[in-house]
Amino acid sequence: MRERGPALVLVGFMGTGKSSVGRAIARRLSLPRFDTDELVAARFGMPVSQIFAQHGEAHFRNAESDVLRQIGGSSEAVIVTGGGIVLRAENVEHLQRVGTVVALSAREEVIFERISRRASRPLLQTANPRETITSLLAMRAPLYAAAADAQVDTSNLTHAEAADAVIEHWNALRTASSV
């Protein structure tokens, strides 16, 4: 395993629980939390869905890469990423340098049920959101797997249970890399 920084990084598709699990981990471990979507939204002064609508996905992805580069990797922190962060190899390389990457996943039907609760997902503003999820998930799942040091399926887990599983992987991987 390659050398990693001290951060815990969460990647994964929308609806896998990255934001909620990241908040739970940060609270439990008293660590700072950096959420790339929140940082981009703050930079623009508008929600991610509005950034997509007004400026387009490419502009959002550029801003996402910029805020990611500003997140240092010198101390323990929880870094929560947007679902598309893995679309750029330089983002993945940065995440792997700053910390241990854990990919959250869930079964497709669970993802659909979770994200159907919020109409603000910009990439799902399509005629057939379920088909869009299937297509995006098929494209991105291998990218999450390749970026990650560990994976946690959140399909049947509460946020607290998923946080426990992620922390367990993080601790095990850090212990293994220090041996």
Image (spheres, rainbow, N blue to C red):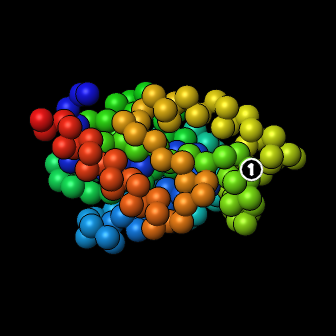
Residue occupying image coordinates x 40% and y 44%: 102
Residue 174, position in %: x, y?
Answer: 21, 43
Crowd class of label 1 (few under 14; some 14 to 19; many from 20; radius 10 Å): few
Q: Quadrant of the C terminus?
A: top left
Residue occupying image coordinates x 60% and y 58%: 156
Q: Which residue is labeled 1 in the image?
A: 109
* Residue positioned most to the left: 179
* Residue positioned most to the right: 127
Q: Nearer the viewer, residue 127 or 42?
A: 127
Q: Nearer the viewer, residue 100 or 118?
A: 100
Residue 18, position in %: x, y?
Answer: 49, 56
Q: Quadrant of residue 1?
A: top left
Task: Find numbered disc 1 in the image and state the secondary structure of the residue it sits on.
Answer: helix
Left or right: where does residue 94 sit relative to residue 39? left
49 lies above or below 101: below
Residue occupying image coordinates x 25% and y 50%: 171
Q: Quadrant of residue 98?
A: top left
Residue occupying image coordinates x 36% and y 42%: 101
43 lies above or below 84: below
Mark 1 belongs to which amino acid? Glu
Residue 139, position in %: x, y?
Answer: 64, 30
Q: Nearer the viewer, residue 53 or 32?
A: 32
